């Protein structure tokens, strides 16, 4: 890894990191702000919920309607879209551009002619990616925890919260690795941002569809969102070993493949 | 002096089925100013991009300072400077920030001093943002970054694009001075007059292949003469075909200009009795010689 490149790359991305942190934190805060009103009107809400198909609740990943009234269940069900989907979009957009932008901005002509190996470039940029994802998760989960503490009616168990946070982090790392991989597949350098955002949304949609439609339940296995367990009120809620292997394995595989492809990539600007 | 600094052996690069370069063999010696000329698309940039390890060769090898450009790229680049043809660079930085960023990659102690010296020479304000610079000023920044670590070898791909004549002359003067201090220069261009000004030897590349490697002086000293005849009456130009090595465009009906490689006495004998307004026999320019090589 090269310190000079790492510092410059980190500095180059810090503004967008802060912006994403602010956006996600604000969304978490706004959502959690309605929790007390929601919980106070439990019977009215239950009457309303009884009118909507069960599938519409299932897409939120909770096993029963009542789970939505616990502060942690509410957090898991409502903030998934902000923390998981937006965080995944952030991770894939950052990672798909972190190597590729040097090519389409034509700065690769400088970067790759400094005394650096391709491995050093790849590792320095990947380190920036990982640290940005870690910082985003740290700040947004701290914001989430703070909101939970502020709006809770009763004490909640921190363990499911930490497990959910870890799942989110793993999901973001997986999308980070996917972005890196996609950028090494692009022959002619150009931004692939739109494609990456669409990919995250499609995978989230597949996950949602598989939760609410029994006939396409198996389709859900294609989406990484399926491997994030949101059922935080389940007493058996834990970090599942197979899911952990899934996230770590695929992320590692994509990262290794990206590294190999980048090491032999022709830089055409 | 005769020790090679660049050795290219049977180097080929194909982009899928498209030819980049094919079986290129080239040797540049330490201390030389070597020209690499050819029109756009001939393979100049492909060759340079392989030397800079931006792209990988399909076949063959390239060594710089005796080291393989693929396997030992980092070691080589500590002593190598590069001016890309495209001067685009980190637009969010100012010049000072960019040059300091560049110099930190190298093990140099006088980097700061060198930056000040070179920016003064090229009359650049270190505080200016790169995105606000004109093409010519971006090129100056690019030139400076290639020299801040005092490289042993400087590879330049169309380095003068965007520079005004005054800056071009300052740049060439700087190159001469660096060359005298021992820096080898590999100068790729399609502008022959520039190559002629600076280089001692030149390689001509055509359609991905080297067609000639020659000293600039011996290239000039070839028997080629430029003959320009102004006729006072209409003549059948086809009668002169046997004399013409390379016909040159004059744009005038009664003026014939061509490169001549035969015996000058035979030319004079042939012209005896013809009604001429003017006859000029002179040394052809390098551009005219190049045109001849290029049509071979």
Image (spheres, rainbow, N blue to C red):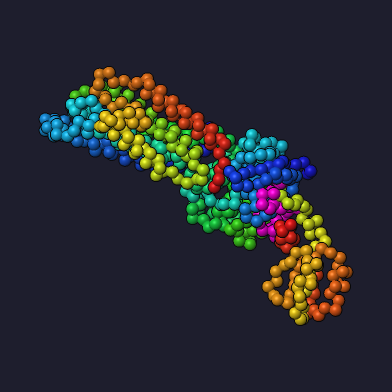
Image vertical order of residue B228 relative to residue B162, above or below: below
Residue shown at the point (75%, 42%) measured from the top left: B4
Tell whether B216 sits left or right of A152. Answer: right
Image quadrant where residue B67 sits: top right
Compare residues A107 and B132 and report the one nearer the observer: A107
Tell whether B47 sits left or right of A168. Answer: right
Residue B7 % position (x, y): 72, 41
Residue shown at the point (87%, 73%) measured from the top left: B269
Whether B184 is among the magenta residues is yes
Compare residues A258 and A26 and report the one nearer the observer: A258
In the rendered view of the protein, which quadrant contains the C terminus of chain B? bottom right
Image quadrant where residue A137 sits: top left
Image quadrant where residue B237 sits: bottom right
Compare residues A89 and B1 and report the one nearer the observer: A89
Whether B167 is among the magenta residues is no
Image vertical order of residue A194 relative to residue A2, above or below: below
Residue B93 % position (x, y): 49, 48
Image vertical order of residue A152 relative to residue B134, above or below: above
Residue shown at the point (24%, 27%) measured from the top left: A62
Total labels drawn: 0
Residue numbers of the magenta segment = B181-209
Residue shown at the point (85%, 79%) measured from the top left: B273
Residue A189 % position (x, y): 50, 45
């Amino acid at each position: 890894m090269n310190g000079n490149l790492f510092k410059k790359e980190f500095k180059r991305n810090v503004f967008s990191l802060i912006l994403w942190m602010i956006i996600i934190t604000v969304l978490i805060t706004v959502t959690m702000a309605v929790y007390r009103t929601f919980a106070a009107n439990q019977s009215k809400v239950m009457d309303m919920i009884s009118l909507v198909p069960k599938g519409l609740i299932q897409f939120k990943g909770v096993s029963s309607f009542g789970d939505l009234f616990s502060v942690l269940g509410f957090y898991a069900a409502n903030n998934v879209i902000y923390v998981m989907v937006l965080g995944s979009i952030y991770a894939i957009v950052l990672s798909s551009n972190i190597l590729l932008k040097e090519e389409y901005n034509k700065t690769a002509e400088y970067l790759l002619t400094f005394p650096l190996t391709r491995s050093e470039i790849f590792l320095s940029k990947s380190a920036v990616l990982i640290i940005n994802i870690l910082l985003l998760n740290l700040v947004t989960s701290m914001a989430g925890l703070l909101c939970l503490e502020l709006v809770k009616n009763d004490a909640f168990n921190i363990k499911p919260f930490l497990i959910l946070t870890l799942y989110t982090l793993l999901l973001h790392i997986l999308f980070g690795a996917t972005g890196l991989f996609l950028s090494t597949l692009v022959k002619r350098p150009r931004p692939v941002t739109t494609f990456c955002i669409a990919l995250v949304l499609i995978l989230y949609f597949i996950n949602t569809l598989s939760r609410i439609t029994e006939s396409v339940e198996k389709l859900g296995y294609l989406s990484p969102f399926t491997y994030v367990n949101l059922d935080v009120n389940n007493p058996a809620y834990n970090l599942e070993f197979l899911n952990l292997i899934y996230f770590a394995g695929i992320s590692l595989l994509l990262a290794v493949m990206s590294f190999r492809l980048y090491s032999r990539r022709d830089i055409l600007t | 002096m005769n020790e090679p600094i660049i050795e290219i052996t049977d180097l080929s690069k194909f982009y899928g089925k498209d030819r980049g370069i094919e079986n290129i063999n080239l040797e540049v010696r330490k201390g030389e100013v070597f020209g690499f000329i050819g029109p756009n698309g001939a393979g100049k940039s492909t060759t340079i991009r392989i030397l800079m390890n931006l792209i990988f060769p399909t076949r063959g090898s390239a060594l710089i300072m005796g080291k393989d450009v693929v396997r030992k790229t980092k070691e080589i680049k500590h002593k190598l400077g590069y001016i890309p043809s495209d001067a685009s660079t980190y637009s969010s930085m100012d010049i000072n920030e960019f040059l300091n960023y560049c110099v930190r990659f190298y093990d140099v102690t006088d980097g700061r001093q060198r930056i000040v010296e070179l920016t003064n020479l090229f009359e650049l304000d270190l505080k200016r943002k790169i995105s606000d610079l004109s093409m010519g000023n971006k090129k100056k920044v690019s030139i400076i970054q290639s020299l801040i670590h005092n490289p042993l070898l400087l590879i330049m791909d169309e380095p003068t694009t965007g520079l005004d004549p005054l800056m071009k002359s300052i740049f060439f003067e700087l190159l001469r001075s660096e060359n005298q201090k021992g820096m080898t220069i590999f100068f790729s261009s399609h502008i022959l007059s520039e190559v002629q000004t600076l280089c001692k030897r030149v390689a001509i590349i055509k359609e991905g292949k080297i067609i000639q490697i020659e000293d600039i002086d011996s290239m000039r000293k070839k028997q080629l003469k430029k003959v320009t005849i102004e006729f006072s009456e209409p003549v059948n130009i086809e009668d002169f075909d046997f004399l013409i090595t390379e016909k040159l465009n004059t744009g005038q009906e009664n003026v014939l200009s061509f490169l001549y490689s035969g015996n000058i006495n035979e030319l004079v004998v042939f012209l005896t009795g013809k009604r001429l307004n003017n006859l000029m026999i002179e040394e052809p320019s390098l551009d005219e010689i190049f045109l001849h090589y290029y049509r071979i």
